[in-house]
Image: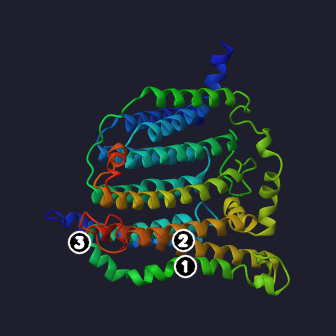
Amino acid sequence: MIVLEELVARYNYLITIFLMVSGLYIVIAHGNMIKKLVGLALFQTSVYLLYIAPGKIIGGTAPIVDPAYSVYSNPLPHVLILTAIVVGVATLALGLALVVRIHEAYGTIEEDEIFSKDGEI
Amino acid sequence: MKLDVILRVGVKLILPSLLLFALYVHFHGDYGPGGGFQAGVMSAAMVILYGLIFGIKAAKRVVPQGLVERMVPLGVLVYLSAGIPALFEGHHFLDYGVLSHDPVHGHEYGILLVETGVLITVSSTMTAIFYAFAERGRS
Amino acid sequence: METFVNAVLLTLLAFATLGVIWQRSLFGVVILAGIYSFLMASVLIVLDAVDVAMTEASVGAGISTIVLLATLFLTQSRENPRPRNVLLPLFVAASVGAALIWGTFSLPPFGVADAPIHQHTVPYYLHQSINDTGVPNVVTAVLADYRGYDTLGEVTVIFTAGIGVMVLLRGRRRRDKKGGSAAS
């Protein structure tokens, strides 16, 4: 019962880990390259949640200094994750450009078909 | 596109306010949420929306490809130019206090210059990526 | 009230992810990824991360969707066949998940103000940034001033990715089958 109580109190972290694990599963199990990249984007987004959720203070507000408020949520994870989001979309665009070139070279973007064709080209 | 009258009129109404909102988010990034990244992505979204509705040729007449390609490294240079003057005064690199008569004002100017560099690079990179993907399919 | 809204949004996120796993048509996957980004932006607003929410909504649901749809248009790929064996990836994913859940038991509870994350440098940033820089938004002050060197590295990464995409995709599509990796 104590385990169940702890799990309910940490629902945030549970869902974050579920998103992370399902992103990992998509990257490992599915063979289509576009779906793998979408799974990688899901994985990255769950890591953002993992960083920002511990920074929240219940009863606090956004970290913009104002005389009316005294309790602010932690601004440091926001800074790190802002960088991470934009770097993530840059790598997604580069990965998709590579997928386009792979499709032009092999005619398909399924991983097992590419492996079987790889001896011919 | 056949049934495009609604889309054309609607997009023509939205686009100027999109650019205005992007500039607002950039300049008011000090006093509210926002900053260079969000503003850069919003201005790129304006060009992409224009290109989606009116065609790539029309978008390239408004924002030429040569201009976009030259803006990509220009943002990085603007960022560096906010940090170089401190080296001439004997301070560390990226010390914004020397940019004005007073350290607090110097930091404000430095932050604004740095965010402008980020805006230029992010908006031109996203537009260049869109142009590159769109041009590949037209053979 | 905040925790209830948070819980509902997180449950919707989990359903969107299950949809991405089970969906076969790639167009549906891309649209579900856009929905996921919008839900993530809403969760981030409830967690008081307003800058991050604006960036995630515009970048994740705007630029990501556009670039994925452009790739779908260029590769013309409709569906993907069944994954070949499901048990080994499922076992790996489940064991990683179990290890991570066991790891979260030692994290501090959600939302208290005396967790170690709020102690060391953050009170300095919250109290001194308005005196040092005159900028009320602490996230902008830290991003552009206190940690400006990291932001320089990030701008360089964006620049490199833009150059990389332009080098890979300039020029027309090569229609010939032989000469596989023809330079453009």
- The spot of residue A59 in percent (x, y) is 68, 40
Tag 1: amino acid:
Pro
Tag 2: amino acid:
Phe
- The spot of residue C115 in percent (x, y) is 78, 38
Q: Which residue is mark 2?
A: C159
Going from the N terminus, do you reach mark 1 or mark 3 first?
Answer: 1
Nearest to the eye among marks 3 and 2: give it: 3
Task: Name the residue located 58 percent from the left edge and 30 percent from the top edge.
Answer: C97
Q: Residues within 10 Å of mark 2 (few under 14, many from 20)?
A: many
Determine if residue B85 is in view. Answer: yes
Q: Which residue is mark 3?
A: B139
Task: Name the residue located 30 percent from the left edge and 51 percent from the top edge.
Answer: A108
Chain letter for mark 2, please: C
In the rendered image, which quarter is residue B74 located in?
Answer: bottom right
Between C44 and B125, the one lying in front of the other is B125
CB atoms at circles 3 and 2 under 8 Å apart? no
Distance, label 3 to label 2, CA atoms, is: 27 Å
CB atoms at circles 1 and 2 under 8 Å apart? yes
In the rendered image, which quarter is residue B109 located in?
Answer: bottom right
Q: Which of the image's four quarters has the C terminus of chain B?
A: bottom left
Distance, label 1 to label 3, CA atoms, is: 29 Å
Task: Name the residue located 38 percent from the left edge and 42 percent from the top edge.
Answer: A31
Farthest residue, direction bottom: B88
